[in-house]
Structure formats: structure tokens, C-alpha cells
Amino acid sequence: MVKGIAAGSSVMKNKYRTFVKEGVASNSTFERSSSATASIGGSNWDEIPNVAGIDYTQISKLPVPQIKLLAVVDNARSVEVAMAFNPNTTDDYDLGYDGISPDSYSNAPNMVYFGQNNNEKKCVITTLPFEMDKRIPIAFKCAAASNVKVTVSDVINFTDSENVYIFDKVSNIYFDIKNGEFNINLPAGENANRFEVTFRNFDMLSNDTNNLVADSFEVYQNNKNAMLTIVNTLNKDVVNCTVYDVTGKLVITKKNLGKNNLIELPTNALSDGVYIVKLNTADNVSVEKKIIVGN
């Protein structure tokens, strides 16, 4: 079929033709063998002769990897949107890949959409290359103050991430929408630039990292030499060290101790007893250790 936008002539040149002898090798409709039939079960297409030189054997015939989200507004209206993943697309609007909301839906009082190009394009289908740390803007339009619930409704041919979250940039809370539900009351209007779909809970990762750094510090009292000894195995930049007695009284404070592997502070002025040592690093990791002074 040829579709044109105006009257004119269509010319078919002989060089557009290709000759392929029918048979098993060319996937002839009239001749199949058991081995040829079995190849249909593969994940990629069989060889397809074409003048464009496309190697279809490198193209998957499985469904496009995608995650579908179901949003329910005030327990009444439900909307399904989808995130698809294709390495040949971009994070901006891609014609033919991203699905803009139809006019009837765009003008609806309540809608859910992915805000492409800073919300210039309101898409119900967004297609983009997958990255584990990617943040995908999602917006909620409400005609009046509304309750919105979002869950993952379907996962198709997608195994790159076990988790899907909605991150609220106002409350700094991650909501697990694959194993749970995002449930929030929103004001009337376009609630854009506030929410993101993510595949990591960055707070959890940050806490895990901080715990690893904190555990890497070895803090102990060298009573023989009357020294508070800090072993900084990761050579973190220690910007503050404070020592408190059991009553909460500050007895030692030192700043800008640097990245030295070994830091020592004299404790000969301290009475025997239990003390709390607190360290702070330049990358906002806090360390708290207990020592016993017996000089």
C-alpha cells in the first residue's frame, strides 16, 4: 500500500525487487520442516530477505520490556500508563516510541502522565533506555483534592530490576509500588515536578553505605599511652571529633583531623570511666563509639 498526502505518481524501480527461491531456508509458507518450525520458538526472528539490509536475526520478537502502572483516583476512576525500555531511545520525547495522551484524555479533569521535555509532552507511554539509577517524572492532575493510589499492574519481559518505587520529593519518602501501594491525598491542580518513578531506594542505599563507612572506623582507648586511638581505614576526611562523659558533658572537641589513617588524641586529663566518642566526616557520615578510660 502507498499512502500519499497529495496527488502524484508512484514509481517502483526494478532494483527494489529481490528474488528468493521458496524453500525451508526462506521460510516458505508452502514448505516447512520440523527444524524450521522449531526455530519459531527462538527469541529472535529468522532471516527475512529485504532490500534494506536489515539483519532480522538480531532483532527480538519478544514483547518490548515494559512496566505498567495502575492509578486509581478516589477509588473510582482508574488509569493505566506504561514505561517501556529501548536502548535506541532517549530520555526526551521520541516520536514513534512515546505515546502522547489523546486529546480527550488530556482534557480530562483527572489524569496521570509522564512529563516528557519538562512536562511539555504529557505521555501515557514513555519509552527510554533503562538505567538502574534512572528517575522518571510522573505527574497527577486532579480537578479537586483527591486520593490517588498507584501500583504496578503488570511487568512484561522485564527482569533488569526487582523493585519499583515512587519517590515523593516533598516528603523524601520512597513508596514500594511493586510489592505495595503508593497512597496519597493530593490538592487540586497539576501535581507535576514532585514525583518520580525509581528502581532504587536511594535512602536505603545511603544508609547502607553510611553503615559500612561507620563500621570501618576502629576507635579504642590505649590506656598504656593515655591516648584515644582512631583507625581510619578508608582514609575518610574527619572534620569533627567530640568526646562526652556519661553525664553528657563535652570533655574533648577537635576539628579538621584530616584523612590520616591513624589519629590519636591525649586522654591523660580524663578521669577513669566510660566515654562516648563521636566522629563526623566530610561526606556526612556519623560515627559513635564507646571507650573505657583507665589511665
Image: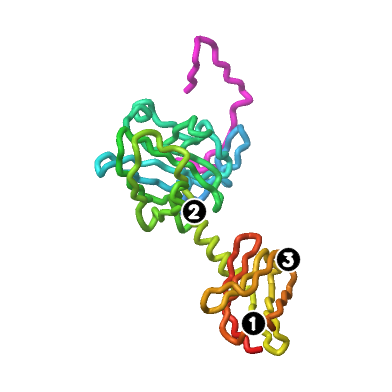
Mark 3 — residue? 258
Quarter assignment of residue 100: top left
Instruction: For mark 2, give the secondary structure.
Output: loop
Is residue 16 magenta-colored? yes
Q: Position of residue 99 (x, y in %)?
A: 45, 34
Q: Residue at x 61, y 23 (%)?
A: 14
Q: Nearer the viewer, residue 232 or 81?
A: 232
Q: Nearer the viewer, residue 108 or 242?
A: 242
Q: Earlier in the sequence, mark 1 or mark 2?
A: 2
Mark 3 and mark 1: Cα distance apart in space: 24 Å
- Residue 119: image location, x then y, percent: 48, 33
Residue 270 — which label? 1
Relative to 99, is 275 above or below?
below
Specify start and end residues of the magenta stretch as a single range: 1-29
Seen in the image, is 216 located left or right of residue 169?
right
Q: Amino acid at mark 2?
A: Phe
Magenta stretch, main secondary structure class? loop
Q: Earlier in the sequence, mark 3 or mark 2?
A: 2
Q: Quadrant of residue 191?
A: top left
Whether 44 is among the magenta residues is: no
Q: Could you give the CA–CA distance between mark 3 and mark 2, rounded to whole angstroms?
A: 36 Å
Point out which mark residue 199 bears: 2
| Residue type at tag 3 | Gly
The quadrant of the image that shows the C terminus is: bottom right
Q: Residues within 10 Å of mark 2 (few under 14, many from 20)?
A: many
Is residue 140 visible in the rendered image? The answer is yes
Q: Are marks 1 and 2 in contact (CB under 8 Å)?
A: no
